[in-house]
Each structure stands twice: as C-alpha cells, then as structure tokens.
Image (tube, coloured by chain):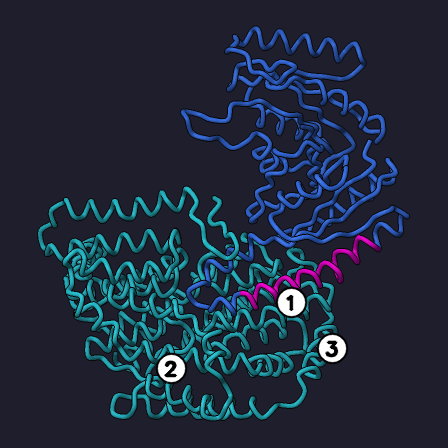
Chain colours: A cyan, B blue
Amino acid sequence: MEKKSRIDGKRTFNRWDILFISVAFSIIALFLITPSPSGLSREGWLMVGILVMAIILWITISIPIAATGLLIMVMQPLLGVVPAEDVFHSFGNQAVFFLIGVFILASAIEKHGLHRRIALKFLSMFEKNPRMFTLGIMTSSACLSFIMPEHGVAALLLPIVASILIAMKVIPKQSNFGKVSMLGIAYGCSIGSLGTPIGGARNPLTIGILANMGIKVSFFDWMKYSMPVVLIAIPLVWLILQFSFPIEVKDISGAKREIEEQVKKMGKMGRNEITVSAILALTILLWIFFSSPEYFGLAVIALLGGALLFFTGSISWEDVEKRVPWGIILLYGGAITLGVGMKNTGAGSWIASILLDITGNNEYLVILILIILAIYITEMMSNTAAVALLIPVGLGMATQIPGISPLFASMAIALSGGLAFMLVIATPGNAITYSSGYFSTKDLLKSGVIANIICVAVIFTVAILYWRGVLGI
Amino acid sequence: MFENILLPISSEFYPRNALRRGGFLAEIFGSRITVLYIIEEKVLDNADRVSDVFRSYYEREETKSDIRRDYLSAADEVIFENAKQFFEEKKISFHEKTDRGEFSDVIQNELNKEKYDLILTGYERGCFLHYRIIDESHVPVWVESDSGNNTILAVCSNLASNQKVPKMSVELARSLGWKLHMLYVVDTQDSVEVDEKGERSDRKSEEDLVATGEEFLKEMGKKGIEASLTKGGLEKETINAAKSIGAGLIVVGRKQKKTTVLGLPVRSTKKKLVDKCEYSILFIN
C-alpha cells in the first residue's frame, strides 16, 4: 500500500489516509449515537470511542502521531467526557518536563559528538572476532540508550556501523554479518531503552500515569525493575541473531582499521565534550540518588542538567530548537490524558473486565496476556501509544485481581511495550536501521518473532520471580 | 538485439545475479551496460514518517543525509567495484550512474533520457520496491532469478495478440543457442480473445478458444517450433510448464487480462508471475 507522499517536505494525503480518517471519525459518531452498555457510564463509552479512534489513527499514521495526541486532548472536552481543565491538569505532570530536560541533554551530547566517542570506545572493546563485534554493537546500542533516547542512538550508530561494513566490503542484504550488525543496533536500542526512564518516552509516560495515582517511581526504582530484563535479554537476543544468521565473515581487521581511523579523526576530547560529560555524569548521579519523591524528583534534575548546559555555553537555544522534537510533548499529552480519562471514566476497568471474562482470574495468565498484548500491539503502532492504550486496561485489571498491583501491571506493560522487534514500522529504530539496506523485512520478521517470544518469557519470569519474589511489588 | 542494457540496482536490493546475466548477454550481443544505482527515497521517507514525532526535522534530515552518503559509499566501494571487476575482466563496455527517487520513476526518467533495448534487474519479495516498471516500461524487462536450464519457455495465450513473443523468442533462442518451447495457454478464467490492436473480444466458448490455440500451434509447427497447449489460469499454467521443463527463461508478452473483479482492482498478471515464479522472466510490452 502506498502510504505517504511528500512534496517539498509537506505531507499530502492519499486516498487511504482519507479513508482511515473518515473511518476514525465515523467510529466516534457511532459511539455518540449508540447507548452505552450496562456497567459503563456514558462518559466511559465515549472514552472507548476516542480510544478506538486513536488506535486507528496511530496504526495507520493517516495524520502525524503527534496530531492524534492533540485530537485526543481536544475530543474529550468536545464530547463532554472530561472537562478541559481536567484534561490539561493531567498533562501538567512533571514527566513532561523530565522529557524536555532529557532532550536538551541529548541535544548537547549529539552536538558535541560525545555519543559517537562513547560508541567507538565500546566497539573497540569488542574487536576480538566478528561475533564478539556484533555483541559489541548490541551492547553499545543498549548502553547509549540508557543515557539518551533510543532513536537518536540508532541514528548515530547507523553511519558508524555502515562505514565499517563498507570498509569490510560487506554486501548489503546478502551478508549475515551485515544483517546481524544492523539488527543488533535496532534490537540493542530497543532493549537498552527499557533500562532507564530516559530511553523511550513511554517510560516517563508510565511514571507520569503512576504519579497521577500517587505512586512515585524514582530513576533508581525504574532501573531496579528494568535492568534484570535488559541484562538477560541482550545476550539472549544476540544468540537468536547468531542462530538466525550464522556469520560468514572471519576477519575483523577491516573493522578495527575503520574504528581506529574514526577515533583518530575525532581527535582528543574537547573542552565542550568534557563539560557535557561532566554535566551528564552529575545529572545521572543526581537522578540515581536524589530523584525519589522526598528529594527533587526526575524533572527538576533533568532541567537542572539542561540549565547547566546553557550556563557553561555547551549548548545554545538554537541547538535546542534544532534537536528537541516538540511533537513528542503532544504525543505524551494525548497519551497521558487518554490514560487518565480511561481510568477516571471507568473505561479501562470495563475493557479489563471483558478481558478477564476471557482469561479468568488466573493472575499468571493475566500477566502473561498483558505482556503479550503489549509486545504485539507495539509492533503495529508507536511504543508510547501502545503503552498509553494498555496501561489503563492493566490498571483496571490490577484493581480486580488481588495478586496484581498497579505498579506491577504498569511496569510489565511499559517494558513489554518497548520490545518491537518484528516490523519495520514498529519503531523508528527498526525503520532507521532498515533504511541502511543491510537486512530485509523478512530477516527482521524471522529473528523478531523468536526474539519477541523469548522476551515475553524473560519479562514474565523476571516479573514473577524478581519483582514479586524479591522486590515484593 | 540488446545493444544498450540498463541494469538498475536499488539501494533496497542488490541483485548480483543480474550483473552475471548482464555479462553473459553483453558477451553475446556486444552490449554496452549502464549500471544505474538508485537511492530509494521511499525507504528514507518511511523512516522519516515513523520517527517524525520522536526526532526533530533537523535530526531526521541529518540522518537522511548520513544514509544517502552511506548508500553512495556502498555503491562506490561495493557495487560499482564488483561491476568493474566483473565487466572489465570480460572486456565489456560499461559505465555507472547514480540517481535518487522511486525505483520505477528513476528508470522511467533514464529511459526518457537515453535509448535502451533492455532493462535487466533482479526481484526481491516483500521489499519497498513495487516494480511498477514491469507493467509500465515499453522496453523489455528481464527479471533474473538465476535458475533453470538453457530452455526458453515462450508464453502465448488468448489474452495477447501473440505477435512479439514468438518473434523475439525465436531470435533470442537462436542468439543464445538455447532450446525454445512455445506454450499456448487458454485462460479459462478470462475467456476472451485479444486482437492485434490489443482489444478484448466478447466472451467466447472454451471450444472456440481452444480452436484458436490449436491453429496457433499448427502455425508454430510449420516453423519447426516445439509447442503445446494447456487450459487453466495463465499464471498457474505458466509456472507449472516452467517447472516441468526447468525453463532458464520465460518470455511473456503484454496480456490484456481483466484488471478488476466485481469492481475491485486485481493484481497484474506480471506481478503475480514474478512474485510466484522462481525462474527468470523476460517481459515484452
């Protein structure tokens, strides 16, 4: 299907877009004229309509993802579901400012090429053989996604790895080494983005929704829940890639030479790089030790880091304008107001009870289904959108099943929602690395299906044994 | 026959077997080969669309420019280098070009600029290329699959005027020194006849269609060409026949098969063939 055409950078609608937009609004009309089912308020019913509309628009991307976020915020007061004041109240969460701070920090890292230096340093530690090198690619993608948004990491690593592959005369789409290297970036970024609240916008979204319920999650708390998943998933997914595409390259000297050349080109660390590194390190330390509710919270530290960058002259407002994607704030706004609206109108609990009628009250089965739903829904739409849709349902389930707490359900959904491994459109990381031309859609599907199944098992096991057994959440 | 061959290679798919086939044809026909590397903008636009909310316009443009640069390096260091080694070894005249845009559009533009006798390409299922060029080009399109023996299967049917295919297949078989087998398919799913102008007739009975086919076979027999007749769906029968003889090349002409069923568009015969068939196909429009 021909999805989009762009003329001079402007987006134009094709007939499919118009069809999907019409269907989305017809759904709203349908919900307006039909009575609400028993057990659900009129507001709840209309909220389900808004949810269905959002699902259609987020999957088809007939209008930009952020514009759907806007629409969600607008539709709630227009349909009389939630007063305008309440809609914007839920938007004014500190997670929004945390996101802004994170993007300002990422701007400085990108501007001075600090991420490039870190990536090259990492890669040079894995030059023993081609297999280890691909593990190095995955590990550096994951580690960089702890300190900056995953999509930026994918965009950074793509040219670095591509230049190495070109220097090694690796043939696009035919070499398994090329496939594993590029898929390693995509999967490494996705897995790494679970590690800290910085990696993906769905993480602060989850923290924001939980904060609205009075459940505070600090930076360190997040890492405590997510890191075991990251540490187990990285080697397992790397092994899946090795089995799916046995590497044919024997000699890694070409990669070594290229990395050495790139390191040489970068030269020594400049003053700005050192300043940005110091501010970044300080910010991370503050996040780890002082982001809990009794101290400063996530946003204050993120904005402090951002302010320090301005004071030290490491970044200008022009850089921020260039590199901060303001659309994500609208997506976040739409997502969080959708989540809060679903919860407050009872729509989330209503959908949850329908699901529980199917699954029964077996808590293990419910957890498994939440994880599977999150992983497979995120394949079809933006991770943030998928998490926004599912968390209210998960919270609804948590209120109905004694063994599942809201924090437990939200974390299971948030982490699973980041693991989009199968489709090109699932996440920007996949789309960016796919555009390198080194792997096909079939390759992505082949390894992605297995990697997703394994990751369902990893999250489920960590959730049951560690979150519940050790941390008691 | 093929003096000037265009060998388009998309950044989406690098068909090395098409390079080999190009070398083989150029040696026989003394052709000049143009390797056209196409940066597939559709793929970049897709990445842009998926990430527009997560990355700023500036960052996305930066990434696009990085990727374009990598594509060009890959073309220079890997693809053109391979082509150079391959063609220079055989002393084949070739030159390289790069362009960016949508695969079929770029080829069409190139055809408007220069005269080519053949487009030689590979085929990748499930990628972003739609291969519209197969349906739209007036220059023969050879889709290389690298399988089969030295036999040409020329496909004629009630859905084509059957003028170009027999002529070109005979000429090709003679030049390549390959065996030729002519297949006449009576397409029972679309029971019309197509005249010399490409106009479709009213529906005809199966007996009438078979009679026309048998007449065609007689004509081929007179020319000493081995031919057979079969009934059924055009794509399915073609693939079955290609399998049974292990065809190295299937020659297919312009088919005037119905383009809609119950008012809904149906996929073109050529696209279906190229998608399902594991043998090389030469489309003559």
x, y percentage for residue B203?
50, 11
Secondary structure mostly seen in the magenta stretch: helix
Q: Which residues are magenta?
A: B61-84
Q: Amino acid at mark 3?
A: Arg
* Residue drawn at (56%, 54%) of the image: B43
- Element carrying mark 2: helix
Label 2 environment density (alpha carbons within 10 Å; few <14, some 14–19, many ≥20):
some
> Upstream in the sequence, badge 1 or badge 2?
1
Q: How far is the residue under mark 2 from the one under mark 3?
A: 36 Å
- Whether residue B117 appears in magenta in the rendering, the answer is no
Of marks 1 and 2, the one in the foreground: 1
Q: Which residue is identified by label 1?
A: A162
x, y percentage for residue B126?
55, 47
Marks 3/1 same chain: yes
User: Contact (CB < 8 A) between labels 1 and 2?
Assistant: no
x, y percentage for residue B254?
64, 25
* Residue drawn at (12%, 50%) of the image: A36
Which numbered disc covers residue A223?
2
Q: Quarter of the image containing the C terminus of chain B?
A: top right
Q: Is residue A430 above or below residue A53?
A: below
Q: Which residue is identified by label 3?
A: A257
> Upstream in the sequence, badge 3 or badge 1?
1
Q: Quarter of the image containing the N terminus of chain B?
A: top right
Front residue of this view, candidates A126 and B32: B32
Q: How far is the residue under mark 1 from the one under mark 2?
A: 31 Å
